[in-house]
Amino acid sequence: MESPARVASALASHGFNASREAVTLLARAEDTDAALALAVEAAPEDALVLTADHVREALDGGTRRTAGPADAADERRSTPDEPSVASAESTGAEPPEPDPSVSSGTDSPKGGDDGGGVAVEMKGSPFDRDPAKRSISVAQDITGQSTGTGEYDDFVRVFRDRYEKLAGQLRGRVNHRPTDSLRAMPSGGDAGLVGMVNDVRSTANGHWLVELEDTKGVFPCLVMKDKGIADLVDELLLDEVIAVEGSVSDDGSILFVDSIQFPEVPRTYQPSTADRHVRAALISDVHVGSEEFMADAWHRFTDWLHTDAAERVEYLLIAGDMVEGVGVYPDQDEELDIIDIYEQYEAFSEYLKEVPGDMEILMIPGNHDAVRLAEPQPGFDEELRDIMAVHDARIHGNPALVDVEGVKILMYHGVSLDEVIAELPEEKASYDEPHKAMYQLLKKRHVAPQYGGHTRLAPEEEDYLVMEEVPDVFHTGHVHKLGWGKYRRVIAVNSGCWQAQTAFQKSVNIDPDAGFAPILDLDTLEMQVHDFN
Ligand code: D5M
Ligand code: FE
Ligand code: ZN
């Protein structure tokens, strides 16, 4: 059989978004190129999507319609080459795919009976891939809303908004006293404070002094080393918002901390699920244009998307770094395969054409993409959208909160993960377990708490980086490591990449997980990772 991905790509270059069945029919034709030419020739001029019916009509010349109602006729393949499945969540393997594809096994092209050499078999399919059943919408996205000018006042406003939003989540849990009233407490006593972490330093005796800031001022809070909560201090990042409780010294100058609270995902959080068996592929970091972009693994992935095994995979979510970009890191040009940024997007668009035309694609930018680096990053501009117009992919900003059939997926590229991993102890966040770094972000209810290091911030009307809602799924990339797990029932997945190790990564010992596609069941929230190496 011809590579379905190649067929899809060829159809796309004729302007057709093709359904998976259409592609499979053509890929299985005896002479795929001839069949392709026939289908393209015969398809109605105004058809945007080339359907299996169009292909059948073209190949049969309208004379050999064997299967029942046209819409139900659906080509199936048996025993697709299933790539190896890395592993499933600890809860066990994913529920066995109902295997309605069980074809009669006579799925080789019949060939030659009508002189065209492009005859195909048709069988009914119980699958229902009705796009009308899909629903995907975006709840939060900076795209088109950016107003920030980068003035001092904008920064003040965005940090105030962060404080307000996160303090709102914490205030009900402690007896919050503003910093000015703490200072005025006549003879100390118990009190709580909700504040933004302004500074963390150790004292001469090995205790921790955490300075918290609210809208009235800053207040020193002392965490004693033997308090049992001292290891939480390890998790603190500057500019995150926490609550503390304890007792204020008699002179009102310091708060002795008994407990520390994070905004958190509620322990009882119950994620929502889709009402039908449908799946989404969650990937990121394609890096087209880099010499290390793994085109072969990509072809295997997109070929797989055309098989029965991927039947239920109806969504493709890409969390940034579509292309390698230019001038992102020193000496990056030495490893560029394509040096022009627009040509990189053109090439990316070609690779995207291999994806079945009947899948919904949604993407957000990353730090290698041609949008502003400061977060929140708006979605691609018109010029880039035009280049990537295939599939009508949905293009949103970074981060974006997306509702896919009732499942709230927070997509964020993940630049802050470098920071979380650098700041926190190894067991709490590391490149080998990137999902644990994501747990920290969930706990802090902010995708990029610490400002001023790796993470660049664009001050906007409000802080778009706060997780106001708890997502059901948190999807990031950037660190090029694969890792997933559950944090209080929220799925955190960092999706690896499609770029082999670069010279820089080699120099710092980053060993990327490339060529994997995490596939998420939207009805059970089970994860399965497919290896396309
Ligand atoms: O980043 C991929 C990963 O590698 C991410 O963890 C940052 C790190 N990285 C890659 N190149 C560099 C350079 N030159 N300096 C610092 N950190 C780097 P990505 O943004 O996808 O390339
Ligand atoms: Fe990347
Ligand atoms: Zn990145």
Image (cartoon, rainbow, N blue to C red):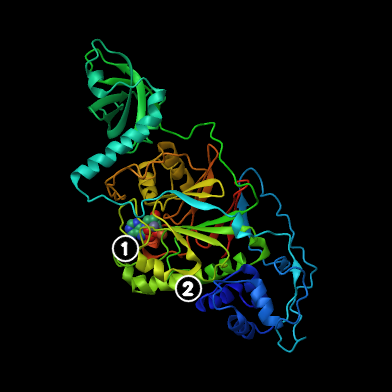
Drawn side of residue 453 relative to residue 305, left or right: left
Cβ at disc 1 under 8 Å from ligand 1: yes
* Residue hosting label 2: 350
Give the residue at x 50% y 67%: 391
Which of marks 1 and 2 precedes in the sequence?
Answer: 1
Near mark 2 (Cα within 10 A), the count class, few <14, some 14-19 or many ≥20, is: some
- Pick the quarter of the image with the N terminus: bottom right
Q: Residue 76: x, y in percent?
A: 72, 68
Q: Which quadrant of the structure image shows residue 102?
A: bottom right
* Residue hosting label 1: 328
Front: mark 2 or 1: 2
Q: Label 2 vs label 1: CA separation?
A: 23 Å
Q: Residue 168: x, y in percent?
A: 37, 30
- Pick the quarter of the image with the C terminus: bottom right
User: What amino acid does circle 2 point to?
Assistant: Glu
Give the residue at x 36% y 72%: 342
* Quarter holding ligand 1: bottom left
Q: Residue furthest bottom?
A: 115
User: What amino acid does circle 1 point to?
Assistant: Val
